[in-house]
Image: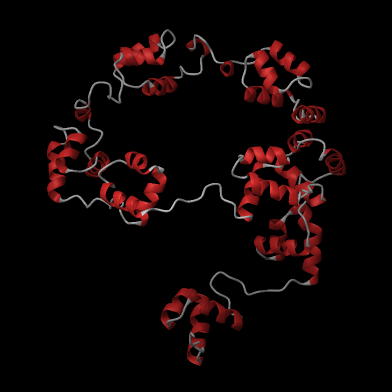
Amino acid sequence: MKKIRIWTDKEILFLKKYYPTKGSKYVAVSLGRTRSSVSHQTARLGLSGTGFLPFRPYSPQEIIFIKKNYPLRGAEYVAEKLGRSPSSIYVKANQLRVERQSVYSWSIYDINYLKKWYNKKRPSQIARHLGRTTSAVVSRASMLGLATYKIQRWTKYEEDFLIINFRRMTYKEIALHLKRSRPSVQQKCVRLKLKKKNLRRWKPQEKRLLSLLYGKITRAELAKRLNRTTTSIGGYAKFRNKTKKYAPAFTEKEKKFIVNNYLKMTNREIAQKLNRTYMGIFRMAAKLGLNHNPEKMKLRPEGYAPFFTDEEKEFIRKNYFKMTNKELAKKLKRLTFDGIRKYASRIGLTGNPEKRKYPRTHAYVYSEKEKNFIRKNYLRMTNKQIGLKLKRPEDGIAAMVGKLGLSGNPQRTVLWKKRKAV
């Protein structure tokens, strides 16, 4: 148990003398106390610190003034009039349950519209109609008691079916059979302590092989030998403290070797000489300020040069719409075409449909015929069927449906449920 230090008369006199001018930190250091104990003692004595006013209770006249003027003019106006801080006015208004009226206050029409259509339309559609955000619509619906979520309890039949088939079937198949969501099935399995796979215990032979071969062979080869996964091998190696320790710090000799041979040898050659990793050499060179040297780029093999020359840039500009990125990479003797794509995006050449000989369906805009086809057949066909007709992806059709304002139709949801049941 900690002993409680009682405040003496001398300490209280010192507190009263220096706290209003120098603050709690000075008093705590000089008296050998904590700042929390000093603040508690000042609260008991009713002392005011530097820049702070003592606690002043609200009078009934001030409360009436807050109720009249806070909803219309806000906390700053009331604070100026009453000689208080805006934060204290804000806290007091919340205690009195006085709300600030603003442009976005809910009218009677908005509330009636929300009550009528909340369970029939999506919150995003209601938000568009009322000119609000979806989060505001959802929060107001929860305040009005419209957003009621019914919890479907598990029956004995469902629990028995889950216990029998949780290893034979996937979570998705069980959810479709029981007409539930996949996360609800997973949560139920966790509550019932059902595991998909039983953990294999490590045998003494496997432990010996791991201790002998770990670090000499790759994890993939070890996994094939032991018929295990690489993650299980890595986890058990950590448990047995077989993982590689951090590399020791670079000595002065190694630093001098890097400085002297950085422009003569590649990083891989230096790493082989010093028995270090490639990334370790790269980071040490960056600390020494040796990287980003154009002479170092000459040592790299052909195709790895990170920067384009002026001739290469002109060649890309002329032939970008005539050749593919792979063909450009072959011509310029580059190993990958990512650099060409990034340089083209900097210049502003990407995103042009002329670049693609066979343009993808999501690369160009929907025509009016396609839009009319979606409008006509939205209630007859699913998004997948419309996508097969128009040769477009299902996600693109769903996005276009949202732009056209067709989503959230109750007839479409009924039709979708009927087809799913069939």
252 to the left or right of 12: left
The quadrant in which the C terminus is found is top right
Could you tell me residue 105's position as x and y percent? 79, 46
- Front residue of 334/65: it is 334
Could you tell me residue 353's position as x and y percent? 53, 13
Q: Is residue 296 above or below residue 106?
A: above
Could you tell me residue 68's position as x and y percent? 81, 59
- Asked whether residue 281 is in view, the answer is yes
The structure residue drawn at horizontal position 61% and vertical position 21%, both measured from the top left corner, is: 393
Q: Is residue 413 above or below residue 137?
A: above
- Front residue of 191/245: it is 191
- Front residue of 337/159: it is 159
- Front residue of 401/37: it is 401
When asked about the image quadrant of residue 31, the answer is bottom left
Q: Is residue 289 above or below residue 326?
A: below
- Asked whether residue 154 is in view, the answer is no
